[in-house]
Amino acid sequence: MATVEVLKVKYPGADAWQMGDSPELASELADLIKKGIKTASCGSFASYQQEKSAPRIGSYNIILDGLNAPVCVTRLVSMRLVRFCDVTEEFARKEGEGDLSLQYWRNEHQRFFTREGHFSKDMELIAEEFEVVEVL
């Protein structure tokens, strides 16, 4: 299996990270990405502003499971700013979670952002879409 260090040589500038806020969720989301079911994600705009290196279109990401093992490599193909209340059914489907409905997306993301400590229906999100370029 390729290590993060080897992958960073193959994909210069790539960041390695887990999605979600628990090892279990990280593994679940990494599996959805690897299978091509999850092709989008989002985070609060406030969180993005605090990151040292902001993601950019065309950048590569090494997706890690809950044990910090690389699962796949993705490439960011689009980013946009959207309010929580304006997320569409189409974007919820691309997130690939649960029953793929907008209602499921709203419920789960409200819980997630509340756990992070900041939720409002008009909060700004960075909505990202990506493609899998390598399954490990």
Image (cartoon, rainbow, N blue to C red):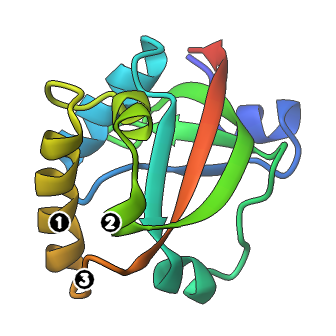
Badge 1 amino acid = Gln
Tell me the element at label 1: helix
Is 63 displayed left or right of 25 in the figure? right
Q: At which x and y percent is residue 21?
A: 24, 60
Q: Nearer the viewer, mark 2 or mark 3?
A: 2
Q: Is residue 96 positioned above or below 87 on the image?
A: above
Badge 3 amino acid = Ser
Determine which quarter of the picture holds residue 10.
Answer: top right
Q: At which x and y percent is residue 84?
A: 35, 67
Q: Is residue 113 positioned above or below 14 on the image?
A: below
Q: Tell me the residue at 76%/47% (across/down).
A: 14
Q: Nearer the viewer, mark 1 or mark 2?
A: 2
Q: Tell me the residue at 11%/65% (across/down).
A: 111
Tell me the element at label 3: loop
Mark 2 highlights which residue?
A: 85
Q: Tell me the residue at 42%/32% (across/down).
A: 90
How many marks the image carries: the answer is 3
Is 4 displayed left or right of 127 in the figure? right
Instruction: Identify the disc placed on residue 120.
Output: 3
Q: Tell me the residue at 56%/14% (across/down).
A: 136
Q: At which x and y percent is residue 1?
A: 55, 16
